[in-house]
Each structure stands twice: as C-alpha cells, then as structure tokens.
Image (tube, rainbow, N blue to C red):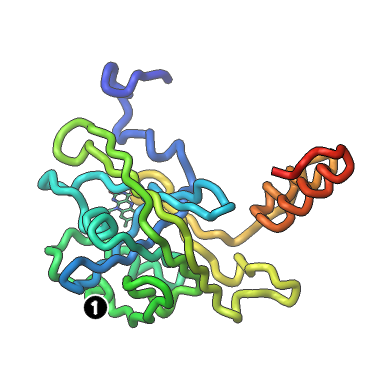
Amino acid sequence: MFYEPGKTAHGLPHDPFKSCVIPRPIGWISTVDGEGRHNLAPFSQFQNVTFDPPIVLFCANQDSSGRRKDSVRNAEQTGEFVWNMATWDLREAVNISAQEVPADVDEFELAGLEKAPSRLVKPMRVKASPIHFECVYLNTLRFPGNGKMGSADVVFGRVVAVHIADEVLDARGLVDVLKIRPIARMGYYDYTSVDSQFSMVIPGNQSALLGGLEGSADKVQRATAAEAAVTGGSAP
Ligand SMILES: Cc1cc2nc3c(=O)[nH]c(=O)nc-3n(C[C@H](O)[C@H](O)[C@H](O)COP(=O)(O)O)c2cc1C
C-alpha cells in the first residue's frame, strides 16, 4: 500500500504511522512549575540527541483542548526537567501518569509513586525508577500542525547529572538492561519491553567510530588525540 499523509487516505482501519517507528523509548518526564507544583508525564516521542555533552529531547503535542502541555511549560518556566526510566514493573504508574489532569494535580501522587529529590535540579525523581537524568532546559522547537493536538513542541535539555541504581549495574559495570526491562511504545495501544539483546561492532576497528557507537566521550577524545599524535595534527 502507499499513501501521502494529509493528502490521500491510507484506507486502513487504524493509522499505521506510529506503528512504523518502533520501538520508541519512553521519556518519563518530571517537572515542577513556578509555584512548586510537581508534574510527571510519559512521552514516547523521546530520544537522546548526542552524547558529548549528553543532550535529550522530548516532544509534546498540544493537549486535547489545544494547550501546550504542562511538561513543556514547566521546563521552559523553570529551566529544568528530569528523565526517569520507564520499566516493566512501573508500567501501570507510567500509564496513570499520562492522564490529562489540571496542573495542580501531582501525577506522582495520582500514580502512587514516591518522590526522590534530585541533586542539581528542582524536579523530583521517581524513586522506584532505576535510572534518572537531571536535565537543564536548552530550547524548544515548535512545529505548527493541524487541529488542536497537531502542533508540537520539541524540548531539548542537556543532561547535567545521571543516577544509576547500583543493583542494575552488572559485574562488568554495564547497565543490566535485561534486569531493568525498560518498556517502549509501539503503535496503537501496544508496548514492548526489552527482554533480549544482541551485540554487533562496526567492522574496521576504528577507535573513534567505536567510541561514538558506545557513546563514550572519553574514548572518542582519547582516540582522536592518539590519531592527532600519529598524524602530527592537533586534536579537536
Ligand atoms: C506511553 C505514553 C507515551 C506518550 N507519548 C506522548 C508523546 O510522545 N507526546 C505527547 O504529546 N503525548 C504523549 N503521551 C500523552 C501524555 O503523556 C499526556 O498528554 C499527558 O497528560 C501530558 O501531561 P502534561 O500536560 O502534564 O505534560 C503519551 C502517553 C503514554 C501513556
């Protein structure tokens, strides 16, 4: 089948678009507004953008009444947000925290979640989540769209602190993803969780490239410095 979004009909009983970009990690974003009211909501339009320095984004469509979402307004207002990892064990709480509720409703309380203070920023962390990023707001890219919900705000933030619970680090110091079992969004009302993994290394043994694949700022810097020493150039 073939269709042109917004131009020709897909002809299927359900829109297939979101099912084609899968699985999407969940940005479970906590914020606080200028009056100290706490907010928590999941966004599957979430990604890391780069690693040195680490930057993440979440993208929020407007809500059903055409308002920009609390998470966006709070991040812009206070300049901070926190990413919490959404796991299989926390799936019901993730879902509950997605409800469209007034700004004075604290979704931590709604979902029965305990808060943990952050170290560098004001938004709270989901205590039961094994990994958190404390983020400083960078900017918002706004995409006008159709109808009340079509317009979207892409919020970028720099990760200034990372928390990883010791019990999800394995004996080699690697994040034990299969123990955490992160959940991710598929299309429709479907989700998946990570319960298998495999490894591949780009052929060619290029240290900087492999450091980038791993997302290791140290290894990339060491590799580019070593290359500069060999070629007589200066490391960037
Ligand atoms: C797993 C999951 C993923 C979601 N992803 C998004 C998303 O990427 N963008 C979005 O605008 N809303 C998304 N939602 C809906 C928001 O979580 C929901 O609109 C929430 O009420 C926003 O809260 P806020 O106004 O407090 O920011 C998602 C909901 C769920 C359950």
Residue toward you, 183 or 153: 153
- The x, y position of residue 117, in whole percent, is 37, 80
Q: Is residue 23 visible?
A: yes
- The x, y position of residue 230, in whole percent, is 89, 42
Judged from the image, the secondary structure of the residue bearing numbered disc 1 is: helix
Q: Is residue 96 visible?
A: no
Please name the residue shown 66% across and 55% down the image: 217
Disc 1 crowd rating (10 Å Cα; few below 14, some 14-19, many 20+) is: some
Residue toward you, 227 or 184: 227
Name the quadrant containing residue 7.
top left
Residue toward you, 1 or 232: 232
Residue farthest to the right? 230
Q: In which of the image's four quarters is ligand 1 placed?
A: bottom left
Residue at label 1? Answer: 109
Quadrant location of the C terminus in the rendered image: top right
Please name the residue shown 28% across and 44% down the image: 153
Q: Is residue 228 above or below residue 146?
A: below
Name the quadrant containing residue 194.
bottom right
- Amino acid at circle 1: Glu
Q: Is residue 189 above or below residue 10?
A: below
- The x, y position of residue 223, in whole percent, is 78, 49
Asked if the beta carbon under badge 1 is closer than 8 A to the nearest atom of ligand 1, the reply is: no
Please name the residue shown 60% across and 65% down the image: 177
In the image: residue 127, left or right of residue 180:
left
Task: Count the numbered circles shown.
Answer: 1
In the image: residue 212, left or right of residue 152:
right
Q: Is residue 23 above or below residue 196?
A: above
Quadrant location of the N terminus in the rendered image: top left
- The x, y position of residue 61, in whole percent, is 25, 44
Please name the residue shown 48% across and 55% down the image: 192
